Amino acid sequence: MAPVPEHKSNEVATAVAAPPALIERASELVRAHPECFWFRHPEARIRHLGDIRLVVEHLREYGDRRAWWAAQELHKCLSPLCKKTC
């Protein structure tokens, strides 16, 4: 009989709300670099720290040099928050 993978049922992913200033900056970057967010629904909203991380990742991966530097600046704002909640 094959072993059954162990699942931890008490682990729950919780979304941590992002500060309004960080949400606004990330939203501006999404509007400024639409080529990096081709997959996003037009009505999707940035609300959580995970959403901010996604913005950083896609700016770095799909953007030009300007987008990459913007991602670095956004990540600097995110880093202290992540250390408190992660």
Image: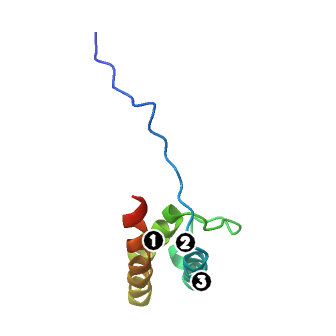
Query: Which quadrant is home to the C terminus?
Result: bottom left
Does residue 79 appear left or right of residue 55 in this picture?
left
Name the residue at 56% across, 82% down: 25
Q: Residue furthest front?
A: 84
Q: CA distance from mark 2 to mark 3?
A: 12 Å
Classify 47 as above or below 65: above
Q: Mark on residue 69?
A: none
Answer with mark 2 or mark 3, whichever residue precedes in sequence: 3
Name the residue at 43% across, 75% down: 62
Q: Which residue is mark 1?
A: 58
Could you say whether the residue bearing mark 2 is in a helix, strand or loop?
loop
Q: Amino acid at mark 3?
A: Glu
Q: Which residue is mark 3?
A: 28
Q: Could you tell me residue 15's position as x and y percent?
A: 54, 55
Q: Residue furthest right?
A: 43
Q: Could you tell me residue 4's position as x and y percent?
A: 33, 19
